[in-house]
DNA sequence: CGTGTAAGGAATTCTGACACG
DNA sequence: CGTGTAAGGAATTCTGACACG
């Protein structure tokens, strides 16, 4: 019903809206961070909600958080947020030095 | 900004959302009832707003109103609504008998 | 781990035209 | 007038793999 949840966007549209490459978008799907539908022919279909999730994912990736941790964060929906933030900081640290 | 105005849907998505054929969708564009954008490669890109317009157009077509009159209606934004409704009834009449 | 890329194929869309009415 | 369809081509997307690190 809500436009935000309609799975109608092609990967090209998502690419344009998020700035991410198709490779990254497909990879985040492989890591279960997003869950597009498929057309009868097999092409992926995303929602604007997926686009928003990808933007949030991108921010976390930039902070050095792994797809694995992002996945867990998403599942816990929040929970031990502080612990995760520290992990993020640590990951970020090891990446930079 | 608003999802409703983003030109990101392919004609296939619009087909699915409206139930119209690609032929019909392209024809309504030719008659200036909608105005999709184009990708760099030339594929049409529609918004959810376009989808809503198409649904409204479909209703009017079913009442026997011509694309020409629908176009005028859209331009006047309302105006002589009664007159138009009568025209619609007449068109509908001639189509049915 | 996260992402780029070349490869070959399949799905999607495009245009212009003929058809019917 | 409004819409279907076959035709040929171009744009878009898909998967699996190799590469780098």
Image (spheres, coloured by chain):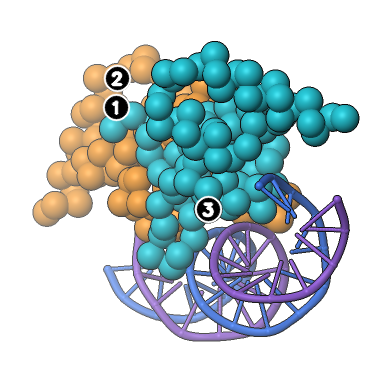
Chain colours: A orange, B cyan, C purple, D blue
Residue A56 picture quarter: top left
Density class for disc 2 (Cα within 10 Å; few <14, some 14-19, many ≥20) is few
Residue placed at 19% from the left, 48% from the top?
A94
Q: Nearer the viewer, residue B56 or D21?
A: B56
The x, y position of residue A68, in whole percent, is: 42, 40
Q: Is residue D10 left or right of residue A21?
A: right
**Quarter of the image where the N terminus of chain B is located:** top left
The x, y position of residue C1, in whole percent, is: 39, 52
Give the spatial CA distance, label 1 vs label 2.
Answer: 5 Å
Return the mark for residue B30.
3
In the image, residue B66 sits, relative to residue A1, either above or below, namely below
Q: Please, what secondary structure does the residue beneath circle 3 have?
A: helix
Same chain, labels 2 and 3: no
Q: Nearer the viewer, residue A4 or A74?
A: A4
Regarding residue B64, the answer to whether it shows in the image is: yes
Residue matched to label 1: A84
Q: Chain of mark 3?
A: B
In the image, residue A22 sits, relative to residue D10, either above or below, namely above
Q: Nearer the viewer, residue B58 or A51?
A: B58
Residue matched to label 2: A81
Give the spatial CA distance, label 2 vs label 3.
Answer: 54 Å
């Amino acid at each position: 019903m809500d436009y935000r949840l309609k799975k109608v966007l092609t990967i090209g549209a998502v690419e344009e809206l998020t700035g991410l490459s198709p490779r990254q978008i497909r990879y985040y799907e492989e890591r279960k961070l997003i869950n597009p539908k498929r057309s009868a022919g097999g092409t992926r279909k995303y929602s604007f909600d997926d686009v928003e999730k990808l933007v949030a994912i991108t921010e976390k990736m930039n902070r050095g958080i792994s797809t694995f941790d992002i996945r867990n964060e998403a599942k816990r929906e929040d929970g031990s947020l502080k612990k995760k933030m520290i992990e993020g900081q640590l990951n970020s640290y090891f990446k930079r030095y």
